[in-house]
Amino acid sequence: MDLPDLRDYHRLRQGFGWHLPARYNIGVDVCDRWAALEPDRPAIIDVVRGQISPVSYGALRDRSNRLANLLRRLGIGTGDRVAILLPQGSDVVVAHVATYKIGAIALPLAPVFGPDGLFYRLDNAGAAACVTDAAGVQKIAPLRASLPALHAILSTDGADGSAIGLPAAMERESSFFDPVPTGPDDPALMIYTSGTTGQPKGALHGHRVLLGHLPGVRFSHEFLPQRDDVMWTPADWAWAGGLLNALLPSLHYGVPVVARAFDKFDPDEAWRLMADLKVRNAFIPPTALRMLGLAMPPPSSRPTLRTVTSAGEALGAEIVAWGLEAFGLSINDVYGQTECNYVLASCAAIGIDKRGAIGRAVPGHDVAVIRDDGSVCEPGEVGEIAVRSPDPAMFLRYWNKPTATAAKFRGSWMITGDRASADHQGYVTFQGRDDDIITSSGYRIGPAEIETCLRQHPAVAEAAAVGKPDPLRTEIVKAFIVLRPGIEASSSLEADIRDLVRHRLSAHEYPREIAFVLALPMTPTGKVMRRVLRERG
């Protein structure tokens, strides 16, 4: 099932086939398998306050087994949701692996989430436990009384109020654990994805999701693993990009992963990190690439990278040209969604690299541009990117949303909402979204969640959020706000509204621009016409 090192796209496509095992567990694959073969092999390179600490596969197995036993002792088991609210670091891997081993469902959550964003996801998922740190405990503590399903909070920084001190508790547990014999379709992972209407939806994946990503990672990283490969990404491991484009596939292949948490992306530090730790492979979203370009060090101080991939936004021609100058290589573009990721990609090493195009279908995935009736578009015709079902990378369903799940499919095609065209060779060129999703700094942001938060401000009567083109971030969030009677617009009010979203929802979703308007444009049925607002700029 692994993609062979054949430098011919057509042979790769024709010779590849999925052969999923009857039993498969992500935790066993990315940890125990290597620990049994080479326990001292480095898996994670933790970088904390300048201190570099390699963590071996054997150490990950020991720690994850102890956590698995602890979770079991706390009554957490098969099918339960375990939230993981931690910055990049080996503790994230330990929590994921332990969750998979007990047959539970990992629920990764980004530290940037504020209380509203956290509460919705914890409540909607019915999370039974949360592995976090002191900062996470402080965020969750005020919410806990309203989260009856949340039985246990475990803190990597030690006991804190009702939170269990994870290091001491794990010390009391056995380092031996017999993993649950899961199958590839058993639920393993749930990542919330933004939509244009309503709150975010939990995309539930089976253990097979990692297997579904492997051909694309190997393809776009030009036949990873190669000698001395070391992976790094600034993308948070709570997102599909950081977790499934970099972390878990690298661990599967035995490639060490650098872990360095950034409160805010620092391009100067990123350059130093890549050079000092001899990073050879990187997954870097376009916004971070642009920021690296503004802080580019002299050639003698740059890392010697072998591969760079990017996803989340369309790569502009200027980034592609800059990548050739800065890294001496082509940046391989990647495309997918949380529901079905890593299905299109480039691979410059075998000539699958066309300016302006994302790439071609990754071997093992059937991807097409289709019309509204499900038929495949002619070359050059604009339609919607779709992925043929079944596909190992494809989600099982949306959590508790059967209607939304059904709406995601058109016959045997899973539709993406992304407009594109394909040429006669199968190169796909992105055209834009057919909905109101905002793409900012690699994040896909749904306006509904932002608008709900905005309306909580006492001065706001109505609100709408749209994406505004931005040269650095692709888009920024811009809010159009109708104030309540008697309230006057001011710069201080604008700052107060902006801070509300930043602190309550998420640091990546707050509106960088706010426009106060007398009314929002509406359809006859009362829906906000975001298209009109986008045209206002």
Image (cartoon, rainbow, N blue to C red):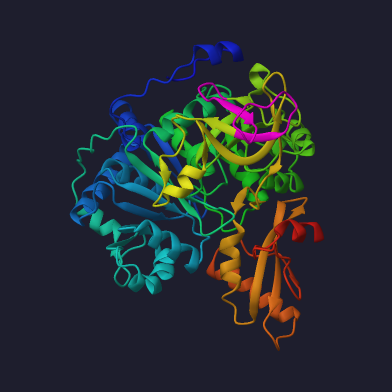
Q: Nearer the viewer, residue 28 or 457?
A: 457
Q: Is residue 254 visible?
A: no
Specify the quadrant of the image occupied by residue 515.
bottom right
Residue 364 lies in the magenta-colored region: yes
472 sits to left or right of 360? right
Quarter of the image with the N terminus in it: top left
Q: Nearer the viewer, residue 276 or 203?
A: 203
Residue positioned 56% across, 58% down in the render: 263
Q: Is residue 34 left or right of residue 198?
A: left
Is 299 placed above or below 203 here?
above
Instruction: Write down the quadrant of residue 380 in the picture.
Output: top right
Is 126 within the magenta? Answer: no
Which residue appears farthest toward the front when viewing the image?
524
Rendering coords of residue 234 (x, y %): 57, 46
Camera-side residue of 122 and 315: 122
Q: Is residue 400 above or below residue 424?
A: below
Name the side, left or right, on which 107 lies relative to 367.
Answer: left
Magenta part mainly helix, strand or loop?
Answer: loop
Name the spot of residue 373 as percent of width and height, x first.
61, 33
**148 horizontally vs 326: left or right:** left
Q: In the figure, residue 519 lies in which quadrant?
A: bottom right
138 or 106: nearer the viewer? 106
Position of residue 50 measured from the top left corner of the image (x, y, whole percent): 52, 52
Residue at the image position 56 percent from the left and 10 percent from the top: 11
Q: Which residues are magenta?
A: 362-385
